[in-house]
Image (tube, rainbow, N blue to C red):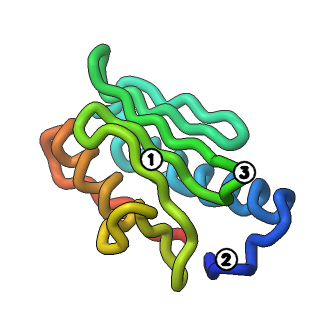
Amino acid sequence: MIVEQGILTSDGQFESYIDYFFQRIVEHLEDTYGSCIEDIISAPGIVEIIVNKRSKIVINQHIPMKQIWYASPLSGASHFKASEGEWVSTQDHDKKFINLLQEELSVLLNQSVKVPNVS
């Protein structure tokens, strides 16, 4: 499933895609880094990655803007929109969602983390 601007036009398409996208991320993190991550809480449209008692990354869908919203103790809040097959920051078009997630989990877990881009 490839993300392209304009393909996820209806709320239903966006929600279905985000559920798929988030579930792939959760499955990968649990399978690959589950012993290092304290907990991953997933519900439709939201994922909380609890690294430890003080560090949590929250990823959620924002349906009206068709964006992914991201919050972490390292970078604060970021918003991402679909663009050319990737989720890019609405503030800094060089910042990609998957790259930020990998970088910040690598810092928080003190090891190299790779997350496949399943868009």
Depth check: 74 or 16 in front? 74
Q: Amino acid at mark 1?
A: Asp
- Position in image of residue 105 (x %, y %): 27, 45
Name the residue at 32% across, 29% down: 51
Sequence order check: which comes first, mark 3 or mark 2? Answer: 2
Q: Which mark, residue 63?
A: 3
Q: Which residue is mark 1?
A: 31
Q: Nearer the viewer, mark 3 or mark 2?
A: 3
Q: Is residue 12 shown above or below 107? A: below
Label 2's element?
Answer: loop
Number of other residues with Cα within 10 Å of mark 2, as a class: few under 14, some 14 to 19, many 20 or more: few
Q: How many angstroms separate mark 3 from mark 2 (CA)?
A: 19 Å
Image check: 49 left or right of 107? right
Depth check: 24 or 86 in front? 86
Q: Nearer the viewer, mark 1 or mark 3?
A: 3
Number of other residues with Cα within 10 Å of mark 3, as a class: few under 14, some 14 to 19, many 20 or more: some
Quadrant location of residue 44? top right
